[in-house]
């Protein structure tokens, strides 16, 4: 998308967290112009929500940098098959595992399969998330609160906890938080709260693991064109999505992926407990 293309055709999906194959236009997640430098050569990564959007872009960029990749996804099989093909086209191994990231047993099994497939695990990217618009907090269903926290927070906890015994010195955890962790979103109160929890999780875990020389950082994207957008908002909101940023447009997933590559690589060897902000220019505290 050029900087002049600042709006999308009205569209909406009922399925959470959304299907990329049904989006118009498709997000730019293949990192076609990305210049690799072997930053992750010989490493293995696991990425939740790796079937589309930011997760897809991160998986492809990691593969370009030399990493084998395990992607976790809910049930978007067509999207996951495409990502697996893209990673393999870069000459790297990829396994795609379907299941609920909020299920502790699934996370443990996914890590087991990743280590079995690659013989190691170096990078963990808890990225899967869901969000549901609610304009009246007093009427926010308890089931929705529990579901959003289970996917966004418990899923990250379960995945990282299962992976930790396999991470060695130099390992990296890169967590997907959000600009909403810093400024909130009135229509996404529970989602904003989960992203704030992940920010605190990043900072606390970074201090706990620093002696083991395992780094923990996070990325806080602003409005990025991913399946979560048409799956969350109505058609008119989608049409206007991202236009209120200083750059006047939404970002694309492959504009976010380099932040994950940097934090996962040895280039960020002196960085832990920190946040990168690919958000179109909004200044956050």
Image (cartoon, rainbow, N blue to C red):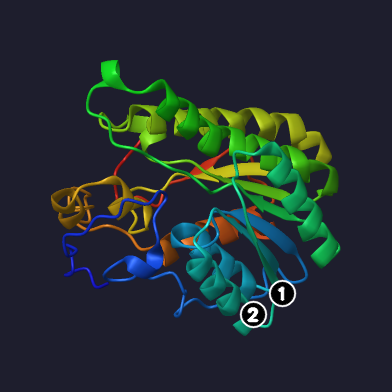
Circle 1 residue: 93
Which quadrant: the C terminus?
A: top left
Of the numbered discs in the image, which one, if any, rests on residue 268? none
Residue 280, can we see it?
no
Q: Position of residue 70 (x, y in %)?
A: 68, 62
Q: CA distance from mark 2 to mark 1?
A: 6 Å
For this orientation, the residue located farthest to the top is 138
Q: Is residue 23 above or below residue 47?
A: below
- Look at the numbered discs 2 and 1 and tell me whether their residues touch, using CB distance below 8 Å: yes
Quick check: 158 left or right of 16?
A: right
Q: Is residue 48 above or below residue 88?
A: above
Give the structural element (helix, strand or loop) at label 1: loop
Which quadrant: the N terminus?
A: bottom left
Give the structural element (helix, strand or loop) at label 2: helix
Circle 2 residue: 88
Q: Position of residue 135 (x, y in %)?
A: 22, 28
Residue drawn 68% across the image and 74% down it: 38
Q: Nearer the viewer, residue 262 or 129?
A: 129
Q: Position of residue 146 (x, y in %)?
A: 49, 26
């Amino acid at each position: 998308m050029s900087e002049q293309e600042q709006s999308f055709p009205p569209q909406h999906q009922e399925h959470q967290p959304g299907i990329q194959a049904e989006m118009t236009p498709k997000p730019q997640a293949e990192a076609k112009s990305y210049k690799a430098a072997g930053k992750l050569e010989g490493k293995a990564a696991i990425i939740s929500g790796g079937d589309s959007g930011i997760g897809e872009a991160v998986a492809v960029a990691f593969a370009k940098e030399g990493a084998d990749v395990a992607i976790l996804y809910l049930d978007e099989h067509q999207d996951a098959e495409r990502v697996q093909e893209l990673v393999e086209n870069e000459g790297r191994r990829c396994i795609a595992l379907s299941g609920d990231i909020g299920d502790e047993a699934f996370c443990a099994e996914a890590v087991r399969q990743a280590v079995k497939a690659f013989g190691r695990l170096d990078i963990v990217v808890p990225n899967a998330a869901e969000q549901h618009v609610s304009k009246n907090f007093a009427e926010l269903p308890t089931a929705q609160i529990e579901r959003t926290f289970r996917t966004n927070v418990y899923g990250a906890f379960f995945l990282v906890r299962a992976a930790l015994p396999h991470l060695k010195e130099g390992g990296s955890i890169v967590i997907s938080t959000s600009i909403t962790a810093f400024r909130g979103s009135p229509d996404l109160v529970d989602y904003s709260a989960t992203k704030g929890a992940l920010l605190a999780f990043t900072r606390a875990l970074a201090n706990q693991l620093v002696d083991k020389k395992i780094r923990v950082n996070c990325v806080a994207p602003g409005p990025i064109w991913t399946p979560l957008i048409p799956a969350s908002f109505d058609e008119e909101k989608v049409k206007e999505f991202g236009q209120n940023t200083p750059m006047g447009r939404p970002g694309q997933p492959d504009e976010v992926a380099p932040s994950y590559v940097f934090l996962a690589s040895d280039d960020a060897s002196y960085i832990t407990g920190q946040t990168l902000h690919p958000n179109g220019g909004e200044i956050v505290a």
